[in-house]
Image: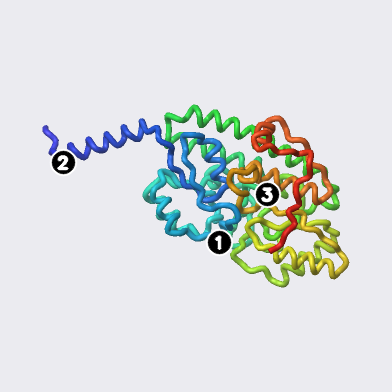
Amino acid sequence: MRLPTTLLATLTAMMFSLMTWADDTSPLKTMVTVGMLGDVVSQVGGDCVATTTMMGPGVDPHLYQASARDVHELNEADLILFSGYSLEGQLGEVLERFARIKPTTAISEQAVDEAQLIHSQDAYGIDPHLWMDAGLWAQTVPAVAEVLATQRPQCRDGIQAREADYEAQLEALDGWIRTSIATIPERQRILVTAHDAFNYFGRAYGIEVSGIQGMSTATETGVGDIRRTVDLVVEREVPAMFVESTINPRTVQAVIDAAASRGQQVAIGGQLYSDAMGAPDTADGTYIGMLVANTRHIVEALGGKVAPLPEPLQGWASHWDLDFAKPIAANNHTE
């Protein structure tokens, strides 16, 4: 039986499309919501992936809303990756819509077992800041690698090689943070920040954490939040607090001023990266650099001593020409 001309043309076009996809050597256009995940994609994907990150330095993913340009780039992308667990809450409907027409994956939800998550009593239900635990975040690496290799099977060998190398770096990072935090005198081992983004960090590395604001920045900080934090800082004689790159430092300064009126002098120990990394093309603009900078600020401000970087991270440090013999700048500024 002879196939109708229109059906034959359709089948031919489909076969050509599939053959073109299978032989496609162009970089996989991948749209990623947050920088921490975007860096994993870039490190694992290499030249096989062209990564675009929606939210840059200083951007708060809890409050972010898609722009017309974002929607255009999402439409142009071959693949969309986001962290999940309501981190990108305002983007929920947009991501759901695109999930119906192209590969779209919540990497954290796919990679990390629920038993390893920190549950919360707020609207989130689950703390979405998984990247603060380098060992936990390392679990996203094989998940990213598999998604990328599925889309670009001809790149699988290279993707798997980079996956193994990057996992080794994150394993070394995890151990280095743990060793460095352990040098802080036990009484001073408390991390006070603008909002509750560091619970995974605290659990993994043995440091108590307290945020002035809750897990999401969508709610306003109340007088009660300030008072509670001042009481804690005075009672524990906390030597330093930390501002965050995505949050106005005024609440931290309010606590410092109130503590000073009660006789407790508190320094700003530096600016930490919580929901976004540093500037592109800098060490802090990488996931490893984000946690290295955070750890150095915390350890030095609270009276500890930063450990030497392990061998698997020496290449990373050399690339960025970092000198660990010098203390990191405290970056004491307020807006």
Disc number placed over residue 6 in the picture, else none: 2
Residue 140, located in which quarter of the rendered image? top right
Residue 316, located in which quarter of the rendered image? top right
Q: Report the residue marked by disc 1.
A: 63
Disc number placed over residue 200 in the picture, else none: 3
CA gap, disc 1 and disc 2: 49 Å
Disc number placed over residue 312 in the picture, else none: none
CA gap, disc 3 and disc 1: 21 Å
Q: Residues within 10 Å of mark 1 (few under 14, many from 20)?
A: some
- Residue 45 is at least partly visible in this image: yes
- Residue 136 is at least partly visible in this image: no
Residue occupying the far right of the picture? 263
Instruction: Decide which of tag 3 and tag 1 comes sooner along the chain.
Output: 1
Location of the C terminus by quadrant is bottom right
Q: Is residue 39 above or below residue 191?
A: above
On the image, the x and y values in percent for residue 191 come to 76, 54
Q: Secondary structure at mark 3?
A: helix
Amino acid tagged 1: Leu
Foreground residue, 264 or 331?
A: 331
For image coordinates 55% across by 42% down, the residue present is 111
Residue 256, located in which quarter of the rendered image? bottom right
Which circle, 1 or 2, is nearer the viewer? Answer: 1
Location of the N terminus by quadrant is top left
Amino acid tagged 3: Tyr
On the image, the x and y values in percent for residue 273 come to 66, 51
